[in-house]
Image (cartoon, grey):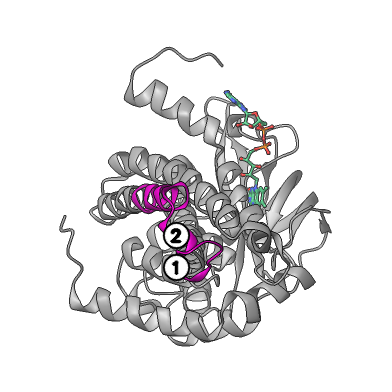
């Protein structure tokens, strides 16, 4: 792994940054978030420019690069305040799983659209009675002749109103042992008996979360992703990119906050020097810079491990990166607000709105506490409490 980006990666970073500048936070993303409207123009343009599909296979219209490059795209957009939540879900989780494990028919049908953004796939694992404990999920797929019949409930599923389908994590019965094991189903949002109800969230965001009711949703045999016996591996193939992209969004938002704070601290004078000359302001900003850089390095390590095919090594690094990035971005936004004094809480800057977005990443896709559990158990070998 090199710490030096190739010319292609540098060019990609610069091109994404240019796009992000045109859809800047205060003029585009913030008003959209407050209105609860999606960032459709940005999404479409990012799709046309090949940014959304940069990590998907070239034969299906993608860029043939890796999760490193997809994270780079998300980081640079977020650093302009124009991060795309659905990138974490549609190309990163669903696109990766389908590219690695989907049948030929599933790849042909979905990947070109996921790559150029013309198709969107949401992802549903969380259930009302099985939040952090995904072993507890009860959504089941039952075989009925040539079809699958899926029944269950999901909560907090992002972007279902814009999605063509949801990749649903369910369970099927093992014929030999009778035990339930995970399985992934592509469920079209237009399927009969599939109902999506918007959740009322206290966050201003362009995307919405939904409760899903699946009551005997009948799907063709081809709705089951890949191999019924390999669903756990398939799931992990998507969850590592999810954590890496979550980290990228957080690092980007932290960079945005820090840039705003530094700009203000360099010019705002209430004594004879700019406020940034006072160590009470300068040191927390310097600390923020260090923490963001450390989180970013861990994110890049996770992406490099993932792209090298080391799913196990990537799992630890991706968890650590998501943890570090969420914490660093929350502190960066907190400090940016403090640096601006009263202006930090004005509607014009929208920093509190972004803080709430950064706050999401401390909880989803996996909470801070569950990452600490993972590291305590898997990295440190400590006994489990649950
Ligand atoms: C804005 C937003 C978007 C989301 N989008 C999606 C999506 O698109 N698809 C999807 O499937 N899900 C989505 N989620 C759900 C998200 O992944 C879950 O909220 C998250 O995994 C936590 O689950 P929970 O909310 O049920 O919390 P719970 O599991 O009920 O946990 C509650 C608290 O207890 C802590 N806790 C739980 N178990 C332990 C333990 N063993 N040790 C220590 N602490 C513990 C948790 O860390 C948390 O602080 C989204 C959530 C939000 C807020």
Circles 2 and 1, Cβ within 8 Å, touching? The answer is yes
Name of the residue lying farthest toward the front? 272
Say which element carries label 2.
helix
Q: Nearer the viewer, residue 59 or 305?
A: 305
- Give x and y (percent) for residue 311: 32, 45
Q: Nearer the viewer, residue 301 or 350?
A: 350
Q: Is residue 242 left or right of residue 179?
A: left
- Give x and y (percent) for residue 41: 61, 85
- The residue depicted at 44 percent of the width and 68 percent of the height is 266
Above/below status of 46 relative to 121: below
The quadrant of the picture occupied by the N terminus is bottom left
**Magenta stretch: dominant secondary structure:** helix
Say which element carries label 1.
helix
- The residue depicted at 82 percent of the width and 58 percent of the height is 198
Q: Nearer the viewer, residue 374 or 27?
A: 27
Lower position in the chain sequence, tag 2 or tag 1: 1
Q: Does residue 61 appear anywhere in the picture?
A: no
Residue under label 1: 266
- The residue depicted at 56 percent of the width and 16 percent of the height is 386
Above/below status of 22 relative to 369: below
Ligand 1 picture quarter:
top right
- Magenta extent: 266-292
- Give x and y (percent) for residue 228: 50, 45
Q: Does residue 309 appear anywhere in the picture?
A: yes
Q: Nearer the viewer, residue 337 or 139?
A: 337
- The residue depicted at 41 percent of the width and 53 percent of the height is 282
- How many residues crowd around disc 2 within 10 Å: few (fewer than 14), some, or many (20 or more)? many
Residue under label 2: 276
Q: Is residue 272 magenta?
A: yes
């Amino acid at each position: 792994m090199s710490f030096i980006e190739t010319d292609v990666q540098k060019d990609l970073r610069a091109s994404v940054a240019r796009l992000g500048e045109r859809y800047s936070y205060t003029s585009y993303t913030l008003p959209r978030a407050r209105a609860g409207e999606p960032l459709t123009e940005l999404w479409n343009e990012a799709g046309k420019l090949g940014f959304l599909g940069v990590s998907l296979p070239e034969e299906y219209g993608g860029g043939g690069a890796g999760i490193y490059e997809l994270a780079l795209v998300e980081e640079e957009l977020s650093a302009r305040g124009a991060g795309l939540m659905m990138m974490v879900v549609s190309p990163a989780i669903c696109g990766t799983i389908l590219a690695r494990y989907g049948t030929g028919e599933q790849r042909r049908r979905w990947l070109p659209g996921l790559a150029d953004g013309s198709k969107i796939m949401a992802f549903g694992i969380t259930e009302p009675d099985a939040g952090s404990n995904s072993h507890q999920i009860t959504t089941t797929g039952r075989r009925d002749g040539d079809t699958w019949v899926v029944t269950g409930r999901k909560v907090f599923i992002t972007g279902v109103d814009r999605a063509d389908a949801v990749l649903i994590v369910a369970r099927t019965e093992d014929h030999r042992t009778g035990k339930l094991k995970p399985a992934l189903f592509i469920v079209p949002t237009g399927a009969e008996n599939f109902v999506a109800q918007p959740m009322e969230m206290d966050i201003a965001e362009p995307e919405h979360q939904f409760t899903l009711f699946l009551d005997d949703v009948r799907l063709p045999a081809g709705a089951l992703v890949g191999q019924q016996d390999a669903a756990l591996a398939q799931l992990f193939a998507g969850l590592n990119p999810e954590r890496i992209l979550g980290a990228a969004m957080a690092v980007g938002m932290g960079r945005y906050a820090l840039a705003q704070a530094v700009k203000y601290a360099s010019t705002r004078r209430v004594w004879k020097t700019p406020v940034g000359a006072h160590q009470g302001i300068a040191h927390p900003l310097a600390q923020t810079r260090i923490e963001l850089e450390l989180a970013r390095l861990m994110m890049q390590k996770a992406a490099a491990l993932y792209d090298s095919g080391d799913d196990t090594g990537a799992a630890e690094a991706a968890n650590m990166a998501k943890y570090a990035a969420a914490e660093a971005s929350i502190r960066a936004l907190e400090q940016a607000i403090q640096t601006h004094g009263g202006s930090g809480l004005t509607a014009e800057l929208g920093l509190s709105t972004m803080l709430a977005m950064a706050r999401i990443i401390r909880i989803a896709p996996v909470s801070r506490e569950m990452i600490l559990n993972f590291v305590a158990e898997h990295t440190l070998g400590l006994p489990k409490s649950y």
